[in-house]
């Protein structure tokens, strides 16, 4: 009887945390909407710029194509959030933009692909890093929508381990490949890898205080992610574009091995 009572109490506690029990939902405010609008416009303009530049590129088209799709998919995600789409309520009665994770599931692997192409890394290294990145995004999504606290933090730990694997690959395996393409490419890769490493570390930190502990307001959360997206995608892609001449004349890592 005691076990049954405890079980019923646990079920009632879970139900009280369920989004279905919410009478009001904390939604993004005017500050958050302003951030969404600004970043949407920045991403849209950036997409147009990269499309225009890709038409005149020759040896570096693949880098522009990656930049186009990184910014284009994010533009769509931000438009969806601005339009009031792609969200649901999660435990704690917070507005949760799941469309952001659909965006990350596409754009983060593209960022990794971009880095791998610049470094001239082996296909297997790029594929393994992309796989770990997708695992990281998926587990953080599951953590965000979890009602049971222990389940939430289980997903978080798995995602954190996957992220560490991604960062190790970027800082070690891909960097070694970039060095074989010459000093200029290695320097360019170093700038890009630093941006990706720093932003990828800060994404989970924003998550911890928003979807994790719910310490941040939804608007503050949106602003935090907006800043990170601008740096990790827009600034990242413009730095790639600034290195167009370096990438156009750099040898492939495989060519360097046989010189």
Image (cartoon, rainbow, N blue to C red):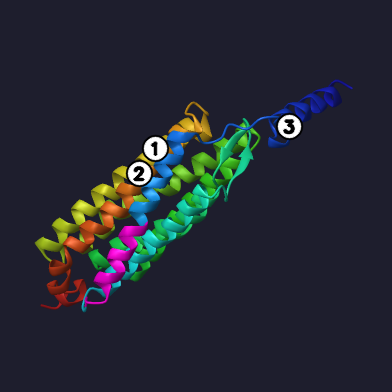
The quadrant holding residue 154 is top right
Secondary structure under the numbered disc 1 in the rendered image: helix
Of residues 32 and 195, the one nearer the viewer is 32
Q: Earlier in the sequence, mark 3 or mark 1?
A: 3
**Residue 120 in sight from this viewpoint:** yes
Whether residue 142 sits left or right of residue 187 in the image: it is: right
Residue 234 falls inside the magenta stretch: no
Residue 36 drawn at (x, y percent): 43, 45
Residue 122 drawn at (x, y percent): 30, 69
Q: Which residues are magenta?
A: 44-57
Separation of residues labelled 3 and 1 (CA atoms): 28 Å
Q: Earlier in the sequence, mark 3 or mark 2?
A: 3
Residue drawn at (83%, 24%) of the image? 3
Separation of residues labelled 3 and 2 (CA atoms): 32 Å
**Residue 121 in sight from this viewpoint:** no
* Main secondary structure found in the magenta portion: helix
Residue drawn at (70%, 31%) of the image? 22
| Mark 3 crowd level (few <14, some 14–19, many ≥20, 10 Å Cα) | few
| Mark 1 crowd level (few <14, some 14–19, many ≥20, 10 Å Cα) | many
Residue 51 drawn at (x, y percent): 31, 70
Residue drawn at (40%, 60%) of the image? 109
Secondary structure under the numbered disc 2 in the rendered image: helix
In the picture of the structure, the residue carrying the numbered disc 1 is 224
Residue 80 drawn at (x, y percent): 52, 53
Of residues 186 and 254, the one nearer the viewer is 186
Secondary structure under the numbered disc 3 in the rendered image: helix
Residues at discs 1 and 2 in contact (Cβ within 8 Å): yes
In the picture of the structure, the residue carrying the numbered disc 2 is 228
């Amino acid at each position: 009887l005691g076990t049954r009572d405890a079980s019923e109490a646990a079920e009632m506690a879970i139900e009280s945390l369920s989004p279905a029990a919410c009478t009001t939902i904390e939604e993004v405010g005017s500050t958050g909407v302003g951030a969404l609008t600004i970043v949407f416009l920045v991403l849209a303009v950036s997409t147009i710029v990269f499309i225009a530049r890709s038409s005149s590129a020759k040896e570096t088209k693949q880098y522009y194509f990656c930049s186009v799709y990184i910014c284009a998919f994010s533009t769509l995600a931000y438009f969806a959030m601005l339009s009031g789409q792609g969200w649901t309520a999660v435990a704690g009665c917070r507005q949760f933009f799941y469309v952001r994770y659909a965006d990350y599931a596409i754009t983060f692997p593209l960022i990794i692909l971009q880095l791998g192409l610049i470094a001239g890394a082996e296909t297997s290294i790029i594929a393994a890093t992309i796989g770990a990145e997708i695992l990281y995004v998926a587990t953080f999504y599951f953590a965000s929508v979890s009602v049971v606290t222990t389940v939430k933090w289980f997903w978080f730990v798995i995602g954190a381990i996957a992220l560490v694997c991604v960062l190790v690959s970027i800082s070690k395996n891909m960097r070694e490949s970039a060095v074989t393409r010459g000093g200029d490419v290695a320097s360019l890769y170093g700038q890009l890898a630093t941006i990706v490493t720093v932003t990828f570390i800060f994404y989970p930190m924003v998550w911890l205080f928003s979807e994790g502990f719910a310490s941040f307001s939804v608007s503050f959360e949106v602003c935090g992610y907006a800043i990170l997206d601008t740096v990790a995608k827009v600034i990242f892609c413009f730095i790639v574009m600034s290195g167009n001449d370096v990438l156009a004349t750099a040898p492939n890592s495989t060519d360097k091995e046989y010189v």
